Image: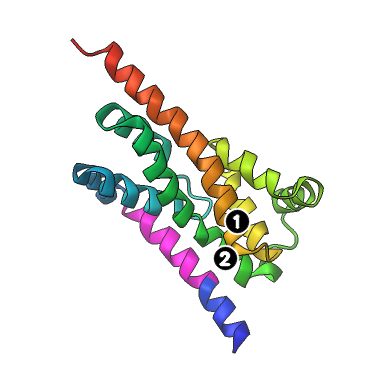
Amino acid sequence: MQKYAKLLGFFLAVVLSIVIFTFRGKFSNLEGYGYLGLFLISILGNATIVLPIPVVITAFLGGGIFNPLWVGVVVALGATIGELTGYLAGYSGKHLIKDDKKITRIEKWMKKYGLWTIFVLAIIPNPAFDLAGIVAGATKIPVYRYLIVVWAGKLIKFWIFSFLGAGSFKLFSP
């Protein structure tokens, strides 16, 4: 039974990623809903596995429209929730990722540096973070630790982008 639950978790993560990537244009209209829209876009944009959706643009534009401090917090929270898809895919499908060179490299980093690997990869805008989430799930890092570290890294990244957005909008305002 547990084997089927893990396969179902992996299947749902992949299907969700494909749906979000396919209909990504429709999700951009959520920004009109303020902080809630930014939160939802962030969840959806980060729920894809290895299909990059540029949520940093959402933080940048949101920072120019709303309070950049709160934009960073809201977008980071949504992004953290969205990153659970990678974690769940890894948790449910460790046998599916054994021979991938990139995943092996991240596993080595995780063995050497632990959660610092996830923290640093969460700060840097890159698609490799999905692989770190998969490794975290596959190696059964407790989900609460994963979420805390991801949120801390994403918070730094999205504060940077939201404050850059706020500053850019001020430069071009009449």
Q: Which residue is mark 2?
A: 89
As drawn, is 89 to the left or to the right of 32? right
Please report the bounds of the magenta region as a residue range.
Answer: 10-23
Q: Earlier in the sequence, mark 1 or mark 2?
A: 2
Labelled pair 1, 2 in contact (Cβ < 8 Å): no
Identity, as a three-letter code, of the amino acid under mark 2 = Ala
Identity, as a three-letter code, of the amino acid under mark 1 = Tyr
Q: Quadrant of residue 146?
A: bottom right
As drawn, is 140 to the left or to the right of 67? right
Category of crowding for the residue at label 1, using alpha-carbon neighbours closer than 10 angstroms: few (below 14), some (14–19), many (at least 20): many
**Residue at position x 75%, y 53% from top?**
107
**Residue at position x 54%, y 70% from top?**
10
Q: Position of residue 38 (x, y in %)?
A: 31, 44
Coloring scheme used: rainbow
Q: Secondary structure at mark 1?
A: helix
Q: What predominant SS class does the magenta segment belong to?
A: helix
Q: Quadrant of residue 167?
A: top left
Q: Secondary structure at mark 2?
A: helix
- The residue nearer to you, when weighing 45 against 38, is 38
Q: Position of residue 149 (x, y in %)?
A: 59, 49
Q: Quadrant of residue 99?
A: bottom right
Q: Is residue 93 above or below residue 146?
A: below
As drawn, is 18 to the left or to the right of 67? right
**Residue at position x 22%, y 13% from top?**
173
Camera-near label (1 vs 2) is 1
- The residue nearer to you, when weighing 149 against 174, is 149
Q: Which residue is mark 1?
A: 146
Marks 1/2: CA–CA distance: 14 Å
